[in-house]
Image (cartoon, rainbow, N blue to C red):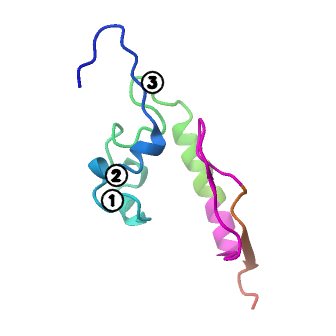
Amino acid sequence: YIIRKGDHCFTDNYVVGRSPKIWGDDALKFKPERWSEKGLNSHDQYKFPVFNINPRLCLGKQFAMTEAKVFAYSLMKSFTFNTIKSKQVLIKSGAILNMDTGLYVKLNKRGDR
């Protein structure tokens, strides 16, 4: 691509996150093992720019990741999660990717049957 002085460039994280050119032929598959090597830092920041790219790296990135891990751990330690199969997941795109009608799950306290 040729980018000239004064040109505006935009990226779309939704498209980048699903691009076979970046992630391979299985880009649309849920593969947590993609991140197994070093977690969020498993891939180049230009390949996964959710928290922006140096020198404009999000100052709250480390705090956000730590907070998310603590929150996820607390929930997973106490509950099991099962999606409600009768509820369809609809995607709503915008500045950030959302679920149009939410994600319906049933939580069961661990140890309860």
- Dividing the picture into quadrants, the one containing residue 10 is top left
Task: Calculate the distance from the C-alpha at mark 1 to the C-alpha at mark 3.
Answer: 25 Å
Q: Disc 2 designates what residue?
A: 42
Mark 3 residue type: Arg
Q: How would you rate the neighbour count of disc 1 (Cα within 10 Å): few for under 14, some for 14-19, many for 20 or more?
A: few
The residue nearer to you, when weighing 113 against 71, is 113
Provide residue 46's location: percent of width, then percent of height: 34, 37
Residue 99: in magenta span? yes
Query: Element at badge 3?
Result: loop
Give how far across and how far down residue 24 sits, in percent. 28, 56
Position of residue 76 in the picture relative to residue 50 (left or right): right
Considering the numbered disc 1 on the image, is that residue within a helix, a strand or a loop? loop
- Mark 2 lies on a secondary structure that is helix
Measured as percent of width and height from the top left, residue 7 is found at 36, 13
Callout 2: few (<14), some (14-19), or many (20+) C-alpha neighbours within 10 Å?
A: few
Q: What amino acid type should be assigned to the residue bearing mark 2?
A: Ser
Viewer-side residue, 60 vs 89: 89
Q: Which mark is residue 56?
A: 3
**Relative horizontal placement of residue 103, taking residue 21 as reference (left or right):** right
Q: Is residue 71 above or below residue 54?
A: below
Comes first in the chain, label 2 or label 3 = 2
Q: Is residue 66 magenta?
A: no
Q: Earlier in the sequence, mark 2 or mark 1?
A: 1
* Residue most extreme to the top: 6
Task: Read off the magenta span.
Answer: 72-100
Q: Which residue is mark 1?
A: 37
Instruction: Residue at 72%, 87% (x, y): give it.
Output: 111
Instruction: Kindly check if marks 2 and 1 are in contact, taking CB atoms under 8 A apart as contact.
Output: yes
Q: Amino acid at mark 1?
A: Glu
Q: Quadrant of the N terminus?
A: top left
Rounded to the nearest angstrom, the CA distance separating label 2 from label 3 is: 20 Å
